[in-house]
Image (tube, helix red, strand yellow):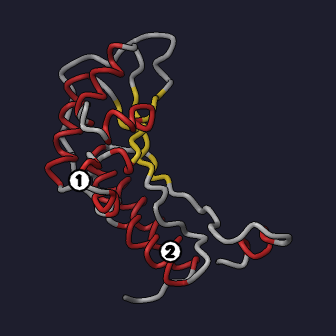
Amino acid sequence: MPEYSRRTVNRHLMAGMLSMLSAPLWAGSSTTTPRVQSPLNNIAFSSWCFHMPLWRGEMKARELPEIARSLEVNALEWTAKTFRDLRGGQDAMYKAPPTAFFQELRLASDNAGISNKVLNVGGPFFLAGVTDAEQQKALAYIMQYVEPAQMLGCEILRTELYFDGEHKPGWEQEAKKRD
């Protein structure tokens, strides 16, 4: 696996984001349901609000757009950690679901008239990891979500820079060195 500096990671992320803006995979898709009009229409809620029922298999991610619509909120922030039913183990959290999963989410969102604004791919690996190997894991994890964010029509692919080293005196300076 090649090694990347923080600057290289940022270049890759920016290139992915720019490609999302310039060449949408879901071009030509339109909603047949009008967008919800309410005072809350500029508020999104996150799939993280439902992480426990999603993890326990009590609900499916494809149900969230209709829930948002029923609450008169017209946008969603998806959290990658919530995409898997974890009853079979946490290993499912480390790999992006298949393309069909994201196509199903996009269809459910379009049918409900809901916008997908953000895809959060923070953790389980962090870009300010203590070692280069941890940073490489974080980059590989994040990059597998660039195309799914594009499929969903997300405007933002959010990551976490979190420093997972020991928080002893001077830890902030150590975290800043991780570029």
Indicate the quadrant containing the N terminus: top left, top right, bottom left or bottom right: bottom left
Instruction: Say which residue label 1 marks.
Output: 88
Q: Horizontal and vertical percent for residue 44? A: 46, 29
Q: Residues within 10 Å of mark 2 (few under 14, many from 20)?
A: many
Label 2 vs 1, first from the N-terminus = 2
Residue closer to the observer: 116 or 175: 175
Residue closer to the observer: 12 or 66: 66
Query: Which label number is shown at residue 9?
Result: 2
Numbered disc 2: secondary structure: helix
Q: Amino acid at mark 2?
A: Val
Numbered disc 1: secondary structure: helix
Residue at 26% x, 45% y: name it: 85
Q: Is residue 73 placed above or below 17 in the rendered structure?
A: above
Residue at 33% x, 33% y: name it: 53
Q: Horizontal and vertical percent for residue 171? A: 78, 70
Alpha carbon of mark 2 to alpha carbon of mark 1: how far? 32 Å
Q: Is residue 142 left or right of residue 40?
A: left
Q: Is residue 97 left or right of residue 140?
A: left
